[in-house]
């Protein structure tokens, strides 16, 4: 079985003490494709270091996270654009709108989101959407590019079935399913039951959003298997089928 983690921050400082061990545990579990979205210009060097250590398994993206959008947004976006000119990446991400903490830079987040979707179009790359407390605001911008048919992943999807169907209808999108599906009363189990697996990819978002029974603790790469097992249980299919279909879906998105 080959599993694919479409969203992991392996370069996070939370992994500095045991990163190599954790990645090896993931590889031993069959998780041999790990895609790393960028956060800001400050996280790029660490991301490249992980890629350098595990070039056959760890693949970087380039982008500016909405929570990193601040007064220096123009400088941050210029760094993103310069790196895209310099070398290849597997995608643009993670990008989007986050209104969880405050709305101070909402307008700048909107502008940065649009600009980076344009970069995805320019470089023929998929993009990874971060949307928190902002589903309608995110979909409004995504819908502007519907006719472009740019591939994308709606990272950490945690909405309802109607919203899932809205995402799927809005473009060439997959739903990123992670640890939230294992949480009691999250409602995501109903979505997974209702939506065809061809629309889903697996993710951890490590070190964040660890699945049960590790909820609240550091998420680790090999915990992806717990997400896959929960989906297999909900879909009443084998773990092998979940691995095969979701990895095929990820290959479709990333072209590799």
Image (cartoon, rainbow, N blue to C red):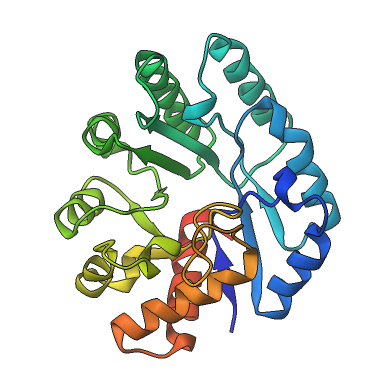
* Relative image position of residue 85 (x, y in whole percent): 68, 27
* Side of 120 where 194 appears, left or right: left
* Relative image position of residue 13 (x, y in whole percent): 74, 43
* Side of 131 where 65 appears, left or right: right
Indicate the quadrant containing the N terminus: top left, top right, bottom left or bottom right. Answer: bottom right
Residue at 23%, 75% in the rendered image: 193
Vertical order, 128 against 70 (above or below): below
* Relative image position of residue 18 (x, y in whole percent): 81, 59
* Side of 76 where 247 appears, left or right: left
Residue at 59%, 78% in the rendered image: 2
* Relative image position of residue 59 (x, y in whole percent): 68, 52
Residue at 42%, 50% in the rendered image: 155
Vertical order, 11 against 81 (above or below): below
Q: Taking the image as drawn, is residue 70 in sight?
A: yes
Vertical order, 49 against 32 (above or below): above
Q: Taking the image as drawn, is residue 11 in sight?
A: no
Kindly indicate the quadrant of the structure image that contains residue 200.
bottom left
Indicate the quadrant containing the C terminus: top left, top right, bottom left or bottom right. Answer: bottom right
**Number of marks drawn:** 0
Q: Residue furthest left?
A: 162
Kindly indicate the quadrant of the structure image that contains residue 34.
bottom right
Residue at 19%, 51% in the rendered image: 163
Q: Nearer the viewer, residue 256 or 244?
A: 244
Vertical order, 119 against 124 (above or below): above
């Amino acid at each position: 079985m080959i599993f694919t983690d479409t969203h992991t921050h392996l370069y996070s400082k939370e992994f500095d003490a045991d990163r190599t061990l954790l990645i090896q545990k993931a590889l031993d579990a069959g998780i041999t494709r790990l895609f790393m979205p960028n956060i800001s210009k400050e996280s790029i060097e660490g991301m490249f270091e992980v890629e350098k250590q595990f070039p056959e398994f760890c693949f970087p993206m380039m982008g500016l996270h909405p929570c990193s959008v601040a007064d220096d947004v123009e400088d941050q976006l210029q760094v993103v654009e310069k790196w895209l000119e310099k070398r290849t990446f597997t995608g643009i991400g993670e990008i989007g709108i986050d209104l969880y903490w405050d709305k101070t830079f909402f307008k700048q987040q909107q502008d940065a989101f649009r600009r980076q979707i344009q970069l995805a179009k320019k470089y023929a790359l998929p993009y990874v959407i971060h949307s928190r407390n902002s589903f309608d605001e995110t979909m409004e911008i995504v819908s502007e590019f519907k006719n472009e048919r740019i591939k994308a992943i709606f990272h950490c999807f945690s909405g309802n079935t109607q919203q899932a169907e809205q995402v799927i209808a809005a473009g060439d999108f997959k739903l990123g399913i992670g640890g939230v599906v294992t949480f009691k009363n999250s409602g995501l189990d109903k979505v997974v039951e209702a939506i065809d697996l061809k629309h889903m990819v697996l993710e951890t978002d490590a070190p964040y959003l660890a699945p049960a029974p590790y909820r609240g603790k550091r998420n680790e790469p090999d915990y992806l298997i717990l997400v896959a097992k929960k989906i297999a249980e909900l879909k009443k299919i084998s773990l092998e089928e979940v691995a095969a279909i979701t990895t095929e879906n990820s290959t479709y998105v990333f072209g590799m």
